[in-house]
Amino acid sequence: MNTRTRRAAVAFCATAMAVSLAACGSAKESKGDDSDKSSSAKKGDDITVGLLLPENQTARYEKFDKPIIEKQISTLTKGKGKLEYLNAKQDATLQSQQIDTMITKKVDVLILDAVDYKAVANGVKKAKDAGIPVVAYDRLAEGPIAAYTSFDNEEVGKTQGEALLKAMGSKATKSSKIVMMNGAITDPNAAFFKKGALSVLKDKVTIAKSYDTKEWKPENANSNMEGAISSIGKGKIAGVYSANDGMAGGIITALKAAGLSKLPPVTGQDAELAGVQRIVTGDQYMSVFKSYPQEAETVAKMAVSIAKNGKLDSGLATGTVDSGTEKGVPSVIVPVVSLTQDNIKDTVIDQGYYTLGEICTAKYKAACDKIGLK
């Protein structure tokens, strides 16, 4: 991330924390200084950090999160820190077993991106009881977590909703029918995305169909969209709210299969390569760009601090959040950006997500040239 972008992110983050979170106080005033006393003895750099990620269908986890976290842990521990990594492949039961595995391995701290934020609460408690603090990552898990970092998830939904209305233009009227393709109900972020989007859309357009898409799977979104097209009529859908890029791909496949000559605008999230390429061609209107490097680096700093000091350094957290079971969890919230054809270079290319060559392959070169992406 360049200096200008990082400064903007810090400023935005401070504003977002003040406006969007049900948070209060600073990390010093919260339990940030003593959030987990189960490991009070200070340790050196020779620590082991456990990392549990929820699935591997979304490209971000293997491409960004895991390698960035691993590199940051190494940097912060002068190469002495180790990472134990497991992926739950969207299976909450498997993730519960993986927590047991990390407890058996006696990791010093556990970074957890939950498959099911409620179901994982017992595992979080077991880890804490075993002297292993848990840092919730990307999704606010329930149970006695020591710290949390993610994006402002309501702001994500608002950003998507506002972009959809902008793309619809004069068609953004109360009589216009849209479809909402929300994420999985087991993911707490999905509820925040939906809430943020509804705050923008509910009084401006008619939500003709709304789905909570099982496991976020593109094939399930595709099936849902086929049902929506059949129910509403293929020529009567003015826009589609899709909570992420993977589902947007399934939605667009269904729309094309229905024989639409002009696709309605479709939103997304995660800035996946396939999603960016669909934005280049105009099949998908936008995605939400989130700085995974910033999020991953932040969680690594939190985890290493807790593992080495037995508590979170007071300067790391910028605010607090409340989960369904915990109050005043020390947190850092990372800002988001609406990604359209206009700022592909300024976001995913300039920040090193993809090269111009990766986006503008032979299949997409003409489309890239058309929008001035050279």
Image (tube, grey):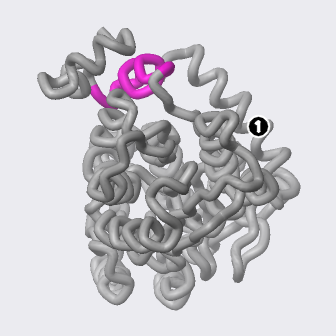
* Residue 320 image position (x, y, % from top left): 76, 58
Q: Is residue 340 left or right of residue 53?
A: right
Above or below residue 334? Residue 189 is: below
Q: In this view, does 160 lie to the left or right of 18?
A: left
Quarter of the rendering containing residue 136: bottom right
Camera-nearest residue between 364 and 272 = 364
Looking at the image, which residue is at 68% across and 68% down?
35
Q: Does the magenta stretch include residue 90?
A: no
* Residue 371 image position (x, y, % from top left): 38, 15
Looking at the image, which residue is at 45% across and 49% down?
300
Q: How crowded is mark 1: few (under 14 residues within 10 Å), some or many (20 or more)?
A: some
For residue 131, say whether it is visible.
no
For residue 215, say whether it is visible.
yes
Q: In which quadrant of the rendered image does the C terminus lie?
A: top left
Count of marks, rendered view: 1
Above or below residue 23? Residue 374 is: above
Give the magenta range: 342-354
* Residue 251 image position (x, y, % from top left): 38, 57
Q: What element carries label 1?
A: helix
Quarter of the rendering containing residue 316: top right
Quarter of the rendering containing residue 207: bottom right
Q: What residue type is labelled 1?
A: Ala
Above or below residue 133? Residue 334 is: above
Q: Is residue 121 left or right of residue 54?
A: right
Looking at the image, which residue is at 74% across and 62% down?
321
Camera-nearest residue between 121 and 104 = 121
Q: Name the residue under label 1.
A: 14
Q: Is residue 93 left or right of residue 269?
A: left
